[in-house]
Amino acid sequence: MNTVRNLLKGSLFRNAELCVVLASYVFVTPVIVHALGDRMFGFWTLMSAFIGYYGLMDFGLSSAAARYLSQSLGKGDLDELNGVANTAFSLFSVIGAAVLLLAGIIALACPMFVSDPAEVALLRKITLMLGVATAIGFPLRVYTGLLTSYLRYDIIAYLSIAKALLSNAAICWCLGRGSGIMSVAVVSIIASLLQNAAVYASCRARYPHVKIIPFQFDAARVRLMFDY
């Protein structure tokens, strides 16, 4: 019965999440364009595109982690569950370090896109800030995988909805007070970090039996995840 209830709640709130996120973007995008102007909005779009490409570095490991975490739960094997979680955490940590390196390279390459020294400095700051936030988020993906394996899609949706509403409200408030692209970046970064922190706290409160120790991994599981 709990499984059916969780699936129904998850389905309902994931659909609600999609509607809220789309509606918030439709409402906020014209506000950002008007406040920042075409040029700064173009820069923000460019930086957002780079962040989107960081997601390609996942290599499907999020799906693999959720799959093998779920398999361990189905067996009722907590030792295996912890082994999978620790291996996934270690792999995501390595990817996070690679994202930091890539962010540094992109920051160095900013003069290829703009010529104004002030704009180069601004873009470098934003690129590095977004890169750091994304890098931090990668290891924490294992906790999203844990919620997924327990069928708690509703919690994932709650947090995503809260992030969309609060971050976009904060962006509108900042822009209404005359702030610029840096405020948009700061709000977006803080919102992502808070969402990740909330996912972590939710998992720690609900599943204290899952113990993640940095860089404790099983080499056999690394190959298994990449094969998946």
Image: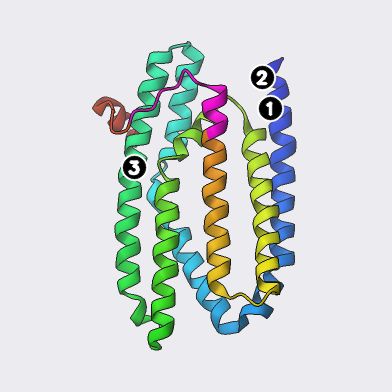
Evaluate if marks 1 and 2 touch, with contact meaning CB atoms under 8 Å apart.
yes
Left or right, residue 16 beside residue 183: right
Q: Residue furthest left?
A: 219
Q: Residue at x 32, y 29 (%)?
A: 224
Question: Tag 2: residue type?
Answer: Thr
Q: Is residue 210 magenta?
A: yes
The quarter of the image holding the N terminus is top right
Q: Secondary structure at mark 3?
A: helix
- Residue 3's tag is 2
Numbered disc in front, either 3 or 2: 3
Question: Tag 1: residue type?
Answer: Leu
Question: Tag 3: residue type?
Answer: Ser
Q: From the viewer's side, name the closer residue of 157 and 212.
A: 212
Q: CA distance from mark 1 to mark 2?
A: 6 Å
Q: CA distance from mark 1 to mark 3?
A: 30 Å
Left or right, residue 137 beside residue 150: left
Q: Earlier in the sequence, mark 3 or mark 2?
A: 2
Segment tinted magenta in the rendering: 201-213
- Asked whether residue 227 is in view, the answer is yes
Q: From the viewer's side, name the closer residue of 92 and 36.
A: 36
Q: Residue at x 72, y 59 (%)?
A: 24
In the image, residue 96 above or below residue 48: above
Q: Earlier in the sequence, mark 1 or mark 3?
A: 1
